[in-house]
Image (tube, rainbow, N blue to C red):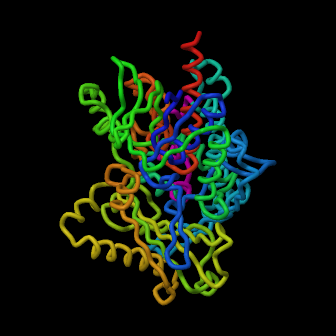
Amino acid sequence: MFYDVIVIGAGNGGLTSACLLQKMGKKVLLLDAASQVGGLSSSFKVGRFEFDYVTQPLAFLGTESHHGKLYDLFLELGILDDLEFVNGSSVFSRISLNTEETYEIPLGTSSFLTKMEEYVPGSKDAVATFLEYGKEFSLALSNLKEPLDYEKMAREYPHFQEFFSLSLQQGMDELKIPKKAQDLLSTFWMHFGSPSKDLSFVFYASYLYQILEYGLWVCKNRSTDLTMTLCHAFEKMGGCIRTSSCVEEILFQEDEICGVRLSNEEEIKTKVIVADVSMASVYGKMLPKEKVTKQMRKFCHARTLGPRPFCVYLGLNQSKEDLGIHDYPYYISASLNSNEEVKNMNGVSSVIASVMNSSSDSVSSHTTTLVLQSFFVNDYFTEQVFNRDYRMLENEIAQKLITIFEDATKTNLHDAIEEISIVSPVSYASKTGSVDGAFGYLSKGYDNLLPRLFAHEQERLIPNLYFCGNYGPLLSGSAESYLSGAFVSEEIVKEGDHHEE
């Protein structure tokens, strides 16, 4: 059997790529080694509670009358009528444990600017400029098409080139944003594991602008509903999905891809492969040894692994009102300074807490589902695993996360815990095959968005082998992984048309 494209890995990026390519007239086979599709965009049940593996809400979505690029993608895929999204939050809370300061910051550009001025008098004009540039950068990034028209880019997006090479810290300093306002603007650094001195100013300003403009959304009935809707759309278009199908080797005829061999020795023919798995997995496990070059090894070793998540899923037998907590996400750390806090991420110091009641009708009004998430940005957890009893280590870290949340919010969770489940970096590594359970690569230096975008063609070391998802040319994140599938699909079709010419 011959397929125009084989997609390895049915995560967000792989599913999106498969759907779009099938819609564009390609014959596509989607393979996944797991017994169910979705990767981390799936859920699990513990007792009467259901949890998503990944709790990061979707950015870039919005509504029919005011929407971002993720809405456009789902509209193109024809899945919006089959899904219901709810606004995950209209506010986020930033808490400093050292000073016991709490900042409740609204989404929506106007409300955000008003609240920032209230918290940091005299900051409004500089923060408004930051968001104006963020809007410009988001438009510029959407128009980075090859070949680049540099004169047009300079004319239409003058600040894009001016701030292109600056870090978030340098950009905020350039705009003379007051220190406390800088710390509050940088809140979402925790998702990327990179502080303001490492994150790209262009990327982060664009990212924050779009969050404020379009909101943060969750899929009703969990991320599994979105995953299954994509699967049904793909199969309805004639695509084929095979689970429990592990790719052992990518096959070549001379220097060209000619298919894959599965673990059951079955061979399937194709000339194009999309990998929604890490470069390390492809180059280290799937390629014949003679095809692995020094440059491939260099690319793998040169990249810094992204944050390793540690999650505690709590099923609580009290309502959020009785517990005294809210639906919005909490960002908790010792201080508000990202450049200082990243130094403490060799242990448990920062927590992102999410109440997930709004994403499922099955949650009783008398119960609460709460997810506490922390990240390691180095080998701390891996090293501890080899020196400690694994279960004891897991429980110790879980209890520390619960205590941090209780101290920050002045609540009592322990007495309400009915169910608890822990997913460590080891668990994520087992489920996704990622090195040390890392989420993609760290958004730092070479692995910031702009270097990735401009270098992605040079990184394609094997013709007709593409990467998407958290290891593709866009940064790690729920929304970004879907968009990376679209990015890769456009590349494949464009290059296919070029070859036909």
Image point (32%, 35%), residue name: 283
Quadrant position of the C terminus in the picture: top right
Q: Which residues are magenta?
A: 161-186
The reply, left or right, for residue 268 in relation to residue 263 is right
Magenta segment includes 183? yes
As drawn, the residue found furthest toward the left would be: 387
Against 410, residue 478 (above or below) is above
Residue at 35% across, 43% down: 264
Instruction: From the viewer's side, name the closer residue of 459 and 343.
Output: 459
Q: Is residue 126 visible?
A: no
Q: Is there any visible trace of residue 479 in the rendered image?
A: yes
Q: Position of residue 194 (x, y in %)?
A: 42, 50
When the figure is inspected, residue 93 is found, relative to residue 126, above or below; the finding is: below
Vertical placement of residue 498 versus 346, above or below: above
Q: Residue furthest top?
A: 501
92 relative position to 284: left or right: right
Magenta-colored segment: predominant secondary structure = helix
Residue beneath the point at 41% across and 28% down: 259
> Within the image, what quadrant is residue 384 found in?
bottom left
Image location (x, y in percent) of residue 342: 37, 57
The image shows residue 262, relative to residue 430, as above or below, that is above
